[in-house]
Image (tube, rainbow, N blue to C red):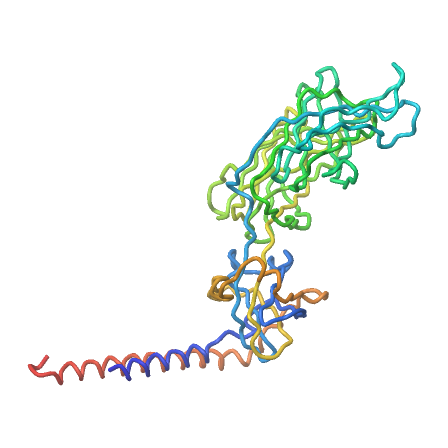
């Protein structure tokens, strides 16, 4: 009986091997180039390739070698930063004064620090006469925060309205400064709406001191509160991957609908606000099933407002990473709406890595786009035993060819009957094998003493 079972299992394995998928079973194919040390290679899947999938979970993706043999692989979805331990703390801030007649630049100051590096006093390097000084920015003491800094929240005197733009620099020794980009805060009244923007994103890196330098020193506000948000995790997720602009439709005033190019786990959306002085309170809805009901996703205020010849733009809404096929935006027309035509929309998703074990000779080819394929991915820990971040970083790298995705031509019509008969014959052999096994088992049972 054991030998019989082994024979049937062997038969099934042979049938499975004979019925393996071939590259031509997939609509889209693209050559891969490999570099570094194998036998494992990791591939950053471009969004353009992901959109060629016929299954939302990318279950129809494969890697083949030169002989057309499928390679063992795993998909690694970079997780969004959820459930992290975040902290918000108030920090000290010190004004950076400079001579009003001096050319714009970084003020020269004398700094006194405590034993632990905390700021005690900040004074101009040279004495400034009363009425001749100008406030160019602020020096923030974040030396007590050891975790990476994620966000800055500023508040200032209420009489100062408008948009405030400034550069952000970081340092650990007050001597060497590295740029951290630019920030903008705002406070103004517009079309019976009160707009306040206090938060500024930081790159998620640690720093003992921050320096904010206003682009227009005369408009630098007098700060009344500075809050810094940090995260206990040092892991910084990779940048989101943005889609190309997506055209939508509008069958009803102040309501717009977009069909996504594929089912995507959306992390962020961006609405194109091409008209100046646009102000739109919005509600965003989504659904995966095109015949299902719309589910509320997010609400917010989108705007593009012009002041002093410069635009302040808030055109993005955060999402929860739900897999969606359609999006709908409803606009409160009290802000003037967004026009009769649907604005362009872009969506952002988390990047996906494919890791495969190279077996057989290259070149290797990535194939995607088969609605009938059964997911064949392995857990990463099974594909690479004892995997960790260090080992992942040392893997070889695979890259898709620069040329566009190759669309496989349809198989010749004459080959279709042969292919169908091949699959039918394989199933017939399998059925015959199972029936033979049942017959042998029945004969063995009847041969036992007692007639059972």
Residue at the image position 54 percent from the left and 80 percent from the top: 415
Q: Residue furthest front?
A: 115
Q: What is the tally of numbered marks visible in this picture?
A: 0
The quadrant of the image that shows the N terminus is bottom left
Residue 57, given in percent of the width and then of the height, sits at 51, 57
Q: Is residue 6 above or below residue 166?
A: below
Q: Residue 391: x and y, percent?
A: 57, 62
* Residue 319 percent location from the top left of the image: 56, 41
Residue 267 rendering spot, x and y as whole percentages = 58, 45
Point out the image quarter for the C terminus: bottom left
Name the residue nearer the viewer: 41 or 6.
41
Residue 191 position by quadrant: top right
Residue 91's quadrant in the figure? top right
Residue at the image position 61 percent from the left and 33 percent from the top: 229
Relative to 292, residue 76 above or below: below
Q: Nearer the viewer, residue 353 or 189?
A: 353
Q: Residue at horizontal 64%, vertical 34%? A: 151
Q: Quadrant of residue 405?
A: bottom right
Q: Is residue 71 above or below residue 334?
A: below
Residue 338 seen: no
């Amino acid at each position: 009986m054991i030998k019989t079972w082994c024979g049937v299992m062997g038969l099934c394995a042979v049938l499975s091997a004979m019925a393996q998928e071939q590259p031509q079973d997939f609509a889209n194919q693209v050559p891969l180039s490999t570099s570094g040390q194998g036998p494992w290679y990791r591939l950053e899947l471009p969004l353009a390739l992901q959109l060629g999938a016929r299954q939302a979970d990318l279950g129809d993706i494969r890697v083949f070698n030169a002989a057309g043999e499928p390679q063992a692989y795993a998909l690694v979805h970079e997780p969004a930063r959820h459930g992290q331990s975040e902290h918000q703390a108030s920090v000290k801030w010190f004004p950076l004064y400079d001579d009003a007649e001096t050319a714009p630049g970084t003020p020269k100051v004398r700094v006194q620090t405590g034993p632990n590096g905390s700021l005690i006093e900040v004074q101009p390097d040279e004495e400034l006469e009363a009425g001749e000084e100008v406030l160019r920015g602020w020096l923030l003491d974040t030396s007590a925060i050891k975790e990476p800094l994620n966000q800055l929240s500023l508040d200032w005197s209420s009489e100062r309205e408008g948009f405030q733009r400034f550069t952000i620099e970081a340092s650990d020794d007050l001597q060497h400064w590295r740029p951290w980009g630019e920030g903008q805060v705002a406070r103004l009244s517009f079309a019976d709406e009160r707009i306040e923007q206090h938060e500024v994103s930081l790159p998620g890196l640690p720093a003992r001191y921050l320096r904010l330098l206003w682009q227009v020193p005369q408009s630098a506000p007098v700060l009344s509160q500075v809050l810094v948000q940090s995260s206990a995790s040092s892991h910084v997720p990779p940048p989101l991957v943005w889609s190309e602009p997506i055209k939508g439709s509008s069958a009803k005033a102040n309501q717009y609908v977009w069909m996504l190019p594929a089912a995507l786990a959306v992390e962020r959306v961006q609405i194109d606000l091409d008209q100046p002085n646009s102000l739109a309170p919005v509600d965003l809805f989504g659904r995966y099933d095109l015949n299902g009901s719309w589910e509320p996703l997010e609400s917010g205020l989108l705007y593009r407002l012009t002041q002093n010849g410069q635009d302040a733009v808030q055109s993005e809404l955060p999402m929860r990473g739900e897999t969606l096929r359609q999006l709908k935006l409803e606009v409160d027309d009290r802000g003037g709406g967004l026009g009769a035509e649907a604005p362009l929309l872009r969506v952002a998703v988390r990047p996906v890595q494919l890791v495969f074990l190279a077996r057989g000779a290259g070149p290797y080819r990535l194939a995607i786009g088969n609605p009938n394929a059964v997911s064949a991915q392995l857990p990463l820990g099974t594909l690479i035993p004892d995997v960790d971040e260090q080992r992942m970083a040392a893997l070889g790298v695979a890259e898709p060819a620069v040329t566009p995705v190759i669309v496989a031509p349809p198989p010749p019509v004459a080959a279709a009957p042969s292919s169908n008969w091949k699959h039918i014959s394989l199933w017939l052999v399998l059925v015959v094998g199972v029936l033979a096994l049942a017959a042998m088992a029945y004969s063995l049972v009847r041969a036992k003493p007692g007639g059972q």
